[in-house]
Image (spheres, helix red, strand yellow):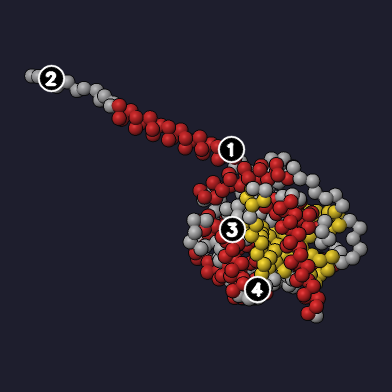
Amino acid sequence: MTETKTKSPVLTKKKKAVISVIAVIIAIVLAAVIFVVAVLRPTAPDDEKAVAVGGLIVSDSVDYQQEESGLSSNPVIKIMQVVWKFCSQSDAKVHEAQTPPENIEKVTDIPYIDDGNIYHMLDVYYPEGTTDKLPVIIDIHGGGWMYGNKELNEYYCLSLADRGYVVFNINYRLVPDVTVNEQLQDVAQALKWISENMQSYPCDTENILLTGDSAGGQLAIYSAALLQSAELREIFDVVDTDMTPTALLLTSPVAYMNDGSAFSLYTKILWGRDYKDKPTYEYMNLDQIIDFSQLPPTYLITSSGDTLAHSQTLKTAELLKSKGVECELADYGEVNGKKLVHVFSVLEPFDEAGTTAIDSAIEFYEKVMDEKATAK
């Protein structure tokens, strides 16, 4: 009887190469997971390493995580949390290089909802020694709805106060702790508090400029519409507020969040995992809500280097003009051979380009106030 010898399998060079590639991929994935977990480790509000990125600040006494949003484990959200955390480092360096005015009275960390949540606070700034009533500016910071707090826009707001205004600088909760709709609810609560407490500060309560940059621009223009429309307030479930803005200042507003663009792959999910099933689904773009109200005169700022929102700003200006809204667009080109970046006037309010842009916006506000006074 002849015995059949079984040969041991021999790996070919091709098989070895495939295994090596798979091993490298697994190693890269594991390294990426470890990196993300390390970067996105949550911290307490008073931790020196705490960064205002949604989902990364937690507290035993305050429930920041709102699982109802269904976004906490979304891979796009995780990627953007990493992006925004590193963006915070860049913004910090920009702030360190600036010298804000010192003659400003600051009243900080005022709760507009008394629930202990750090995101439910605001600051008030106005020139020291003020005896006259000053026009009001209310600012809503940007940060892709996921990043930032009032401190991010502090220097910008101080530059506005230094021009002779009472400035309210507000916080709101961040995605994925909440959705964009809940951010609008926060802003409405802040506006209600301001409306009911302006008399405690040197405010000309008849003149209010509502302003916001990037995501804050979207929150600002939506809030202006919600202030005027009971029907919209019911859809978005926001509180009624006795406030009528005199004008809007929108710096690179992202007011179209579900327009089919590549950017909307990110923005539309910020309304929640089940955003398609919500009453707000049909109202995620500015052109879907604009007919509910008559918006006040609006000034818009963008730049040729605004890669995030240049086209959105132009689109917003075109829509406002088509609806009969008094509107001016400042679309800045290069300065000293350099393109101006997204929300340049908010990031660097004290340099030449930022100062020029802010001065022009304030001139528009003053013109609108003069027109209002003349019309009485």
**What residue do we see at 31% from left, 30% from top?**
15
Q: Residue furthest left?
A: 1
Rendered view: 316 above or below 231: above
10 Å neighbourhood of mark 2: few (<14), some, or many (≥20)? few
**What residue do we see at 38% from left, 30% from top?**
20
Residue holding disc 2: 3
Say which amino acid is labelled 1.
Ala
Q: Secondary structure at mark 4?
A: loop
Q: Residue furthest bottom?
A: 376
**What residue do we see at 75% from left, 71% from top?**
368
The x and y percentages for residue 309 are 59, 57
Q: Give the CA distance from mark 3 to mark 4.
A: 20 Å
Say which amino acid is labelled 2.
Glu
The x and y percentages for residue 343 are 66, 54
Which sits in the foreground, 353 or 152? Answer: 353
Numbered mark located on residue 283 in the image: none
Say which amino acid is labelled 4.
Val
Q: Give the CA distance from mark 1 to mark 2.
A: 59 Å
The x and y percentages for residue 135 are 81, 66
Numbered mark located on residue 310 in the image: 3
Q: Quick check: marks 3 and 2 in contact, CB under 8 Å?
A: no
The x and y percentages for residue 167 are 79, 60
Residue holding disc 1: 38
Q: Is residue 357 visible?
A: yes
Counting residues from the start of the chain, the first of labels 1 and 2 encountered is 2
Q: Give the CA distance from mark 3 to mark 1.
A: 34 Å
Residue holding disc 4: 325
Say which amino acid is labelled 3.
His
Q: Residue furthest front?
A: 337
10 Å neighbourhood of mark 4: few (<14), some, or many (≥20)? some
